Amino acid sequence: MRLVHWLFLISAALFVSGIGFLVAGARTAQQGSDVQSAVDAPALTPVATVKQIMQGIVVPAATAVFGSVATIVTASGREDRAPRTDEDWQAVGNSAAALVEAGNLLMMGNRAVDRGDWLKMSQALIDGGLLALKAIDAKDPDALSSAGEPINLSCDNCHQKYQRTGS
Ligand code: HEC
């Protein structure tokens, strides 16, 4: 009887200390994940104005994407322009990726004029850029050409609402 009693006490003690280990383990994991998220999200300080992002990133990238697929008719004939070599596709891919990232930059910090349409319209630029990237991954000139339309629409819609006149 006495032995059984002791065994019960020992197993109860083991059970309780086991819970202690679980709690300690969960705490350690929690602290670990706090450290991890601090590493994942460094403090970011937006520097460029929206105008600089437009002139420095958006315009050159959009020009490259819009111009990558075109039919050019001149006196000497017709040229169907499209990316052909791996380098061509990579170059237009860089520009489409820059458009996507410009959309991210537009949503950062106090660049976001509001939490409504500004975010939606920045997202529309991102979505258009992603569509172009998908076409580029597939090396599909027609799909790349079609992606120009939603990209262009995202520019126009945002300017209509937010571009101050005179700039
Ligand atoms: C989310 C909103 C938004 C999107 C999307 C957007 N723009 Fe803009 N853009 C602006 C605003 C706001 C200005 C005015 C900036 C200023 O003058 O301070 C501007 C200004 C410009 C200007 C004039 C810059 C100057 O010299 O004054 C050009 C050119 C331009 N954008 C091109 C584009 C193109 C091309 C696209 C699409 C590929 C685009 N933008 C997408 C908000 C946007």
Image (spheres, rainbow, N blue to C red):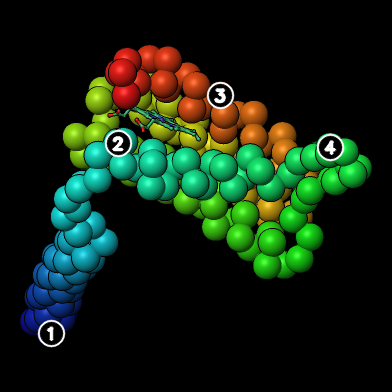
Identify which residue, 81 or 42, lies in the foreground.
Answer: 81
Identify which residue, 34 or 61, lies in the foreground.
Answer: 61
Say which element carries label 3: helix
Residue at 16%, 55% (x, y): give it: 43
Mark 1 residue type: Leu
Closer to the N terminus: mark 4 or mark 3?
A: 4
Say which element carries label 1: helix
The answer to whether the residue bearing label 2 lies less than 8 angstroms from the nearest atom of ligand 1 is: yes
Q: Is residue 137 left or right of residue 16?
A: right
Residue at 76%, 66% (x, y): give it: 85
Q: Which mark is residue 153?
A: 3
Q: Quadrant of the C terminus?
A: top left
Q: Is residue 55 left or right of residue 66?
A: left
Viewer-side label of 1, 4 = 4
Q: Is residue 93 visible?
A: yes
Q: Is residue 104 visible?
A: no
Residue 44 position, x and y percent, is 19, 53
Residue farthest to the right? 77
Mark 2 residue type: Val
Closer to the N terminus: mark 1 or mark 2?
A: 1
Q: Which residue is mark 2?
A: 50
Say which element carries label 4: strand
Q: Quadrant of the N terminus?
A: bottom left
Mark 3 residue type: Leu
Mark 4 residue type: Val
| CA separation in Å, label 2 and label 4 | 36 Å
| CA separation in Å, label 1 and label 2 | 79 Å
Q: Which residue is mark 1?
A: 3
